[in-house]
Every structure is written in structure tokens, then in C-alpha cells.
Image (cartoon, coloured by chain):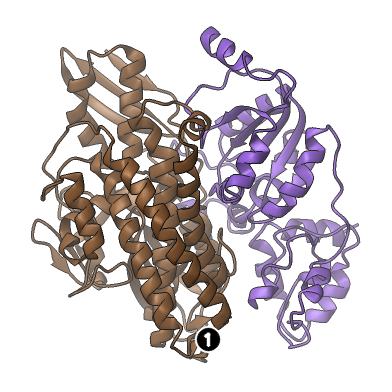
């Protein structure tokens, strides 16, 4: 441990210290970052990387961090401990992606009949941790969230330098539709095909509707997103049950219910 | 004595390793899985079939293309949906692209440092700046194909039951062809680096399982074969291969006709099908000096390089042929939603990936089963390590740990896939 500290200490002391930590997930948000290739390496070179287990074997020395970045869902007690430890040592805690921010696809389990989901998968369920899926902010204070399943890497490139300066960025409150229109896409809703775009936080470059895939809301409700108007607009395109089912995919359903109960 | 590695980094998902050795005899060697469960098969029950590829591909952030595709093929088989040749060609292309970017990530950024005794990739990058750039270029060709045809690299969007929601323009295809041609020199540069590596000697006779199709090196379809005489259609997969869960284990192991130890992935495919590789890939094997059958699991990494050579050439071939096709034929056609049971398999980067789905008359899922490559090789990996361990047991702890990690990583395990 001492040796490692010494080794790391030789690096530029002024660079912000960061760590990228993953809980339970597909790790796709980390790959979205790695997939930036040289641009990611360029961003990393502006920091002192204390822990990023996709790139290094060295043990995390556990030192204080300027930014702790966390991806995935706290699905085990060990995950929860990792998350809390990361919060403790980080000036800013930044969340990567839908699993951490909204529960992600594992949250579908919460909407099913309790213990039955696991019985579809395992014969011996004893001794297997099967916690209720909860978003990261149920356990720790979150300073900033990069939303999406996966995150939009360009958004990371845009906002991460601000975070390095200790500032908290603000993603503009605009629907997915804004970027969708700017790209010249034909509106799915106008074609009588369902799309959650109007109530969902934009910033994803409307990647789904650009592929003629409906927005299913992985980036979450925008602040002024109007759920009631959305339901009304979709009335003739999907049943209430289909609306509910679709909103479960990215853990949006509980947020919609909270908004409607306000 | 007990050997424990708390966390193996540079690998998809979370796992450690534990072994117990008594007077030189390995009593147990076990991968300790530290991944939470997501219950993907369970959460799919009761959902509409259209959600299946969307949810299932989120099993893995490296290889979503194959989870998406295999689930789609299984649903098509369940409902009796047939797709156009153009659709099949685009899907084959996506698979080669998936192989290119997954293998390039693993062999360069996850595994290579182990053969150079470097602990941190940032140091590897400093030491080999040119090769790193070339490795990134190779990845980018694979990723660009997935982006252009799939709509996005991590969790693609266009592929669905019956075809594609959207297809690229001919200009986009021409740009990809140009990029592919430029990638060939990057492939040579990285391939050369791998020729010079000192790879440990270790051998253990084993059974290699993969898909096989007459005349071609197939990833997309074929029969399930092995070097020990197995040959069955994919529809009979679960008759020969069965999952078994040990108490408290979250990865279900797989046994093949009663044997739990068999191998899948690049090393299995190349062993079984090397004669069908492009001659440039075959020549590279000659330069490596490898002979078949090859039972050194470390060579899995070199065989990923072999497959990259083949995959880039094959992708270019498909791209050029798509340049002469009417891609509108790959766009989803109308089909009927029907009740049924369907199975499908493809060769994922890490080996044979199998899905079955059972769908009701309204299109809702009754049952899903997913058998991933890493789940299939888990027991094989542990048996291999048990055989490898005596040779490294007397090394100083730090060096031994490094060797064991390198061994496990050469397998390219994906714990997220295996647990799902």
C-alpha cells in the first residue's frame, strides 16, 4: 500500500482525484465512456485516476476524492457499502446512468409479484441476496446525474470539465422532442405511434426516435414534464396497461406515480 | 494453504478467486462471484415480446448486439416469422462488428498488459502509444458499423422481430467500406505486437463447442458441434446441455451430456473451424506457430486476434455486397403474432449464446431461458486453474496473483452475462 501511494504521489498533485466505481449493472455506461477512445483518454489525463477497475489492477488506496463516479444499482449489501464508502470520501458524488439514477431494468422486479420473480430463475433461492431495487439516492446524497440507458457520452464530455472545476452543471429542461425535431425526424406521435418524448428529459440527441424507436423514458421525467397531457396524447395509441408496462422498463413508473400524486 | 484474490479487475463484472491447496494438491479452486442478481429471465415473464430484445440486451454493455439478436431470432422461431436475406446479411454484419470491438477491447485493453507484466493500462498506453491508437482504430471500425446499422453502439436500437426499423443510406455504407479498408493496416500493427508476446505454456485436453455451418465460419447460425463428436441442431440444445444450480450460487453452471467441463469462445471456434478462416487469418496462425488441436487456454487471446483479422475482412465483404442490394428489403415486414416456443443460438464473442422463449397467443412471454458463454465455461475455468495452480504455487504471492489473474482474464469472462 505504501509503495503504491508513493508511486501515485509522483503524479501531478494538482490534478483532481477521481474514481469510477460500478455496482450491479451491465457496465454499459462505463463502456459508453471507453468507447470515446482517445477522447476519453484525453479526459482521464486531466485527472488522477485513483480507481477504475476496467483499466487497472492496482488496489484502490481508499484516499479522498474530488469526484466519485458510480454506475449501477446497489443490489447487494456489499454494493451498498461500496456506495456509502464512495460517498464518504468524495467531495462530489456523480451518478452514471439509469440503473443508479432510476433503478434501471432490474426495477421491473419491484412491479412484479414479490418473491415469484426469483423463483422463475433459481431453484435454490436460500442464501441469494434479493433486495428490493432502490435508486442510489435512497442511500446517499447525489450531486449530479448523467441520465440515460446508457449515458450519452457527448453529455459527459460536455459537463465533466465543469465537475472537475467543482461546479455542478445543469441539464436544460427540454423534451427529447427538441433535438428530435432539430434532426429532421418525422414525429412518431404524428404517425400515431407511441413515444414518451414530450415528457422526458432531453439531451440524448433523440437517439431512439432517430432510429424509429419510441422514447421509453430512460432519462427520466423532465422537471416540467406533463404526465397528464402525455397520457391523453397516447390514449388512442396504447392502453393504460401498455403505458404502465412500458414505463416500467427504465424504472420510470414510480416517478410517474409520484408526479401524478403531487 | 489458502489462496485468495479479492477482486479481479479488468474484466466485465465482479468476481474474486479462492483456492485451497494441501501439500501441493489443489483441493478446490473457485471463482467467487460478487455480482448482484438482476433476474432478467424472471422480469421478462409476463411482458410483451417486443420488450424482450430491449431488456435482454441490457444483460451486457459489451455484447448487447448478440443478446438482442439471439432473443429476436428465438422469438421469430417461436412465432414462425421469416426474414429477408438482406435482413440476415445486416445481422451477420452486426455480429462481425460485435466480435471486432469486443475482442479488440479484451485482447488489447484487458488482457495484453498481463503478457507484458504491466499492472495499469495507463502505463501500457504510455509505453505503446502507436499500437494503442491502432487498437482504438480497430475498435472504432466495429463500433461504427454497430452505430450506423444499429443506431447506437451500447444498446442498439434498430434490430427487431421481422427485420430492421431503419436502414442506412448507400453513402453511409460507402463511408464504412472506406473506414474498413483503412482499418486493415491497424489490424496488421496490433497483430504484429501479439506475435512477439511470451505466452505461458499450459495444456489440458478438453472439448471445444461452437456453431458450425457447412462451408463458412459461421457466427449467425448452424448446428452445435464439438471436437469430440457432438453434432446437434440448436433446437435440441437443451437436451444435451443442461443448467444446474448449486446452492447459494448465482451463476447456473452448464453440463454437456453429463460433463461440466467444456470450452466455448474464440479458442473453441478456431480449433473446430480454422480451415474455414480467410487465408490471411490462417497465415497469421502459422506465424504464431500454433498447431491443432491447441489446448492452451492462454491462446484464446491470440485466437481473438485471428478472429479480428477474419472479421474485418468478412465485414468488408458484406458491406460491399450490401452496396449492391436494395436495403429497403431489410426493413421490418408485417407478420402475425402467434403462440409458440422458439430457440436460437449465435456465436457471441465469448462463445455460444442460447435463448429460448415461450410466447402466448397475445404475444406475452410465458417463459425465457438464457444460457450464456461464461456460465458454460465457469466449471472449465475452475478445472483449468486447478491444473495450472501447482505450476505457480511456489512463486512469491504477488507474482502468483498476477499469473492467476492473467489466466482468468485470458478466458475473457463476462460475469454480468453469466449472472444476468
Instruction: Check the image and name the residue furthest to the left.
Output: B229
In this rendering, would B77 be left or right of B109?
left
Image location of residue B335, percent across then percent down: 49, 90
Q: Considering the numbered disc 1 on the image, is that residue within a helix, a strand or a loop?
A: loop
Crowdedness of circle 1 by 10 Å Cα count: few (<14), some, many (20+)? many
In this rendering, would B188 be left or right of A219?
left
Q: Is residue B260 visible?
A: no
What letter labels the chain drawn in brown? B
Residue at image point 39% right, 82% down: B321
Of B92 and B76, which appears nearest the observer?
B92
- Pointer 1 residue: B331
- Chain A colour is purple
Image location of residue B2, percent across then percent down: 30, 16
Note whether B76 is above or below B113 in the view shown: below
Image location of residue B121, percent across then percent down: 49, 33
Of A41 and B14, which appears nearest the observer?
A41
Image location of residue A214, percent across then percent down: 68, 74
Chain for numbered disc 1: B
Amino acid at each position: 500500500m505504501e509503495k503504491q501511494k508513493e508511486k501515485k504521489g509522483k503524479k501531478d498533485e494538482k490534478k483532481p482525484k477521481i474514481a469510477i466505481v460500478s455496482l450491479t449493472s451491465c457496465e454499459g455506461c462505463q463502456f459508453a465512456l471507453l468507447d470515446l477512445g482517445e477522447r476519453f483518454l484525453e479526459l482521464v489525463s486531466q485527472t488522477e485516476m485513483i480507481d477504475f477497475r476496467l483499466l487497472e489492477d492496482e488496489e484502490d488506496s481508499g484516499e479522498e476524492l474530488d469526484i466519485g463516479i458510480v454506475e449501477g444499482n446497489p443490489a447487494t449489501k456489499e454494493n451498498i457499502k461500496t456506495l456509502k464508502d464512495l460517498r464518504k470520501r468524495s467531495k462530489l458524488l456523480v451518478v452514471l446512468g439509469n440503473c443508479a439514477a432510476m433503478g434501471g431494468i432490474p426495477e421491473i422486479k419491484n412491479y412484479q409479484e414479490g418473491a415469484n420473480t426469483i423463483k422463475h430463475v433459481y431453484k435454490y433461492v436460500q442464501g441469494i441476496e434479493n433486495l428490493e431495487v432502490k435508486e442510489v439516492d435512497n442511500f446517499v446524497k447525489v450531486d449530479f446525474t448523467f441520465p440515460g440507458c446508457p449515458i450519452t457520452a457527448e453529455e459527459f464530455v460536455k459537463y465533466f470539465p465543469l465537475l472537475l472545476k467543482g461546479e455542478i452543471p445543469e441539464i436544460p429542461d427540454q423534451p427529447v422532442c427538441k433535438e428530435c425535431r432539430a434532426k429532421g425526424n418525422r414525429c412518431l406521435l404524428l404517425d400515431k405511434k407511441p413515444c414518451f418524448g414530450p415528457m422526458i428529459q432531453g439531451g440524448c440527441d433523440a437517439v431512439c426516435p432517430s432510429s424509429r424507436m419510441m422514447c421509453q423514458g430512460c432519462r427520466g421525467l423532465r422537471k416540467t414534464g406533463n404526465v397528464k397531457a402525455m397520457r391523453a396524447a397516447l390514449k388512442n395509441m396504447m392502453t393504460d396497461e401498455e403505458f404502465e408496462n412500458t414505463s416500467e422498463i427504465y424504472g420510470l413508473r414510480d416517478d410517474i406515480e409520484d408526479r401524478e400524486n403531487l | 494453504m489458502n489462496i485468495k484474490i479479492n477482486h479481479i479487475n479488468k474484466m466485465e463484472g465482479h468476481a474474486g478467486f479462492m483456492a485451497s491447496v494441501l501439500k501441493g494438491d489443489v483441493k478446490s479452486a473457485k471463482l467467487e462471484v460478487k455480482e448482484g442478481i438482476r433476474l432478467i429471465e424472471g422480469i421478462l415473464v409476463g411482458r410483451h415480446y417486443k420488450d424482450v430484445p430491449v431488456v435482454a440486451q441490457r444483460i451486457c454493455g459489451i455484447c448487447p448486439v448478440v443478446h438482442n439478436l439471439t432473443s429476436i431470432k428465438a422469438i421469430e422461431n417461436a412465432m414462425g416469422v421469416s426474414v429477408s436475406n438482406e435482413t440476415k446479411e445486416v445481422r451477420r454484419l452486426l455480429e462481425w462488428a460485435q466480435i471486432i470491438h469486443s475482442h479488440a477491447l479484451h485482447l488489447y485493453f484487458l488482457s495484453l498488459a498481463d503478457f507484458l507484466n504491466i499492472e495499469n493500462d495507463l502505463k501500457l498506453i504510455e509505453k505503446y502509444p502507436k499500437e494503442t491508437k491502432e487498437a482504438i482504430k480497430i475498435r472504432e471500425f466495429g463500433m461504427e458499423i454497430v452505430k450506423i446499422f444499429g443506431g447506437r453502439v451500447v444498446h442498439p436500437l434498430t434490430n427487431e422481430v421481422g427485420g430492421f426499423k431503419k436502414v442506412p443510406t448507400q453513402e453511409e455504407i460507402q463511408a464504412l467500406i472506406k473506414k474498413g479498408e483503412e482499418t486493415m493496416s491497424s489490424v496488421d500493427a496490433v497483430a504484429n505486437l501479439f506475435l512477439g508476446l511470451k505466452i505461458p505454456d499450459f495444456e489440458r485436453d478438453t472439448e471445444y463447442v461452437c456453431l458450425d455451418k457447412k462451408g463458412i465460419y459461421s457466427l449467425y447460425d448452424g448446428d452445435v458441434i464439438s471436437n469430440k463428436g457432438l453434432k446437434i441442431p440448436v433446437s435440441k440444445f437443451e437436451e444435451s446441455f443442461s443448467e444446474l444450480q448449486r446452492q447459494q450460487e448465482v451463476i447456473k453452471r452448464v453440463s454437456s451430456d453429463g460433463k461440466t467441463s467444456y470450452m466455448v469462445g474464440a479458442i473453441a471456434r478456431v480449433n473446430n473451424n480454422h480451415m474455414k478462416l480467410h487465408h490471411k487469418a490462417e497465415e497469421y496462425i502459422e506465424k504464431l506457430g500454433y498447431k491443432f488441436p491447441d489446448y492452451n487456454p492462454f491462446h484464446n487471446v491470440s485466437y481473438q486476434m485471428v478472429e479480428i483479422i477474419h472479421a474485418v475482412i468478412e465485414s468488408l465483404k458484406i458491406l460491399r455486397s450490401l452496396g449492391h442490394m436494395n436495403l429497403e428489403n431489410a426493413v421490418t415486414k408485417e407478420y402475425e403474432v402467434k403462440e409458440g416456443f422458439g430457440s436460437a443460438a449465435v456465436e457471441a464473442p465469448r462463445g455460444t449464446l442460447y435463448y429460448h422463449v415461450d410466447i402466448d397467443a397475445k404475444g406475452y412471454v410465458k417463459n425465457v431461458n438464457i444460457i450464456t458463454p461464461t456460465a458454460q465455461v465457469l466449471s472449465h475455468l475452475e478445472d483449468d486453474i486447478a491444473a495450472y495452480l501447482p505450476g505457480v504455487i511456489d512463486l512469491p504471492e504477488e507474482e502468483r496473483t498476477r499469473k492467476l489473474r492473467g489466466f482468468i482474464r485470458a478466458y475473457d469472462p463476462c460475469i454480468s452475462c453469466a449472472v444476468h
